[in-house]
Image (tube, grey):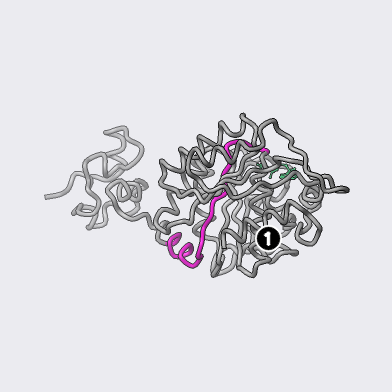
Amino acid sequence: MRHACARGPMEIAKKSDVLIGYAAAVGCPAESCEAGKAGVCQGCPGRELCLQQQGGVDEDQKYINVRMKAIKKKILVLSGKGGVGKSTVAACLGMALAKLNTKVGILDLDICGPSIPKLLAVEGQAVVNSQYGWTPLRSPHSEVKVMSVGCLLGESDSPVVWRGPRKSSLIKQFLKDTFWGRLDYLIFDTPPGTSDEHLTVVKMLLNVKPEGAILVTTPQDVALATIRKEISFCRKMSLNIIGIVGNMASYVCPCCKEESPIFTDDGGVQSLCNEYSIPFLGTVPLDPVLVMCCETGTNVYEQNSIAADTLLDIARTLL
Ligand code: ADP
């Protein structure tokens, strides 16, 4: 007896008006489907989706698992809102870990506003596609490997106007095709909030047990309110929270080194950590030397920066 989907995917699509999972639309359990075995499902655009819906393994996920298992620790850097210094913290932590003799890579998942290429001075370098996959770029000053959409775009001024599914598929491709080799740390710099990018990467890393997430915030209420959402997101997704970094809480005078608080309640991050029983990783002061390094793409660890020293301490805590 011939299986219903042996009539062919296009006919079924027309009948049921279902655009995805043609075989599934007629109840084809792809694994056991006789017609599927006979090759009728072969070439069907809905085949992979059917398999996934029925608990089968996503072929790409297998490759991602292999790539990610070569990396000891995978850390996501998250923030509730933009401008709190998430990319700066991600880049400096990467440089600090490299300074502490570990092999580090940074994957910039901020598709629409990538800033990692500038911070790690790889702007203008071209990504080479070798037989092993995309070769990450190497920061000239810190031995950190970098992959970012910013390195794939020809013109840095062109906007990336992409909807969620397209971003998700690029992230999947970054995870699947980047040839990192063996690394001690892979740091994921994510866009602010809890969106497609976050869902995709957390889901893809589920099988390879990421170390967890570092949350970055400034201590004012408007930022702390958004970081609560990040905490809920991490808990919902069973993503471990390594700790919270309070950024730009105070200003250190470059001449006399006196520290002055900027926000009314500079202990807000610490209280939040206590409230949720999350480790407090430290406070990074607002530092003009760090700003200058970010603007010029120089290694902050080659300068005398108080913010960099704090981040080096945080990196030691991670180690
Ligand atoms: P986000 O990734 O959260 O959007 P960025 O890392 O791009 O934020 O940082 C926003 C701006 O703040 C950048 O110009 C950066 O140089 C500056 N910045 C971040 N952290 C510090 C700091 N500790 N001291 C001084 N400037 C900082």
Q: Residue at x 59, y 55 (%)?
A: 107
Residue nearest the observer in this picture, 74 or 47 = 74
Residue nearest the observer in this picture, 7 or 20 = 20
Residue 187's image quarter? bottom right
Q: Amino acid at mark 1?
A: Met
Q: Residue at x 57, y 37 (%)?
A: 80
Q: Residue at x 71, y 64 (%)?
A: 142
Q: Position of residue 81 (x, y in %)?
A: 61, 36
Q: Residue at x 17, y 47 (%)?
A: 3
Instruction: Kindly tell me whether mark 1's CB lies below 8 Å from ligand 1.
Output: no
Crowd class of label 1 (few under 14; some 14 to 19; many from 20; radius 10 Å): many
Q: Quadrant of the C terminus?
A: bottom right
Within the magenta stretch, is there residue 255? Answer: no
Q: Position of residue 161 (x, y in %)?
A: 61, 37
Which quadrant of the frame does ligand 1 lie within?
top right
Question: Can you say whether 250 is above or below 240 in the image?
Answer: above
Left or right: residue 83 compared with residue 244:
right
Residue 92's image quarter? bottom right
Q: Helix, strand, or loop for circle 1?
A: helix
Within the magenta stretch, is there residue 65? Answer: yes
Q: Position of residue 192 (x, y in %)?
A: 59, 39
Left or right: residue 297 compared with residue 108:
right
Q: Which residues are magenta?
A: 63-83
Q: Which residue in the protein does label 1 denote?
A: 95
Q: Position of residue 182 (x, y in %)?
A: 54, 70
Residue nearest the observer in this picture, 251 or 151 = 251
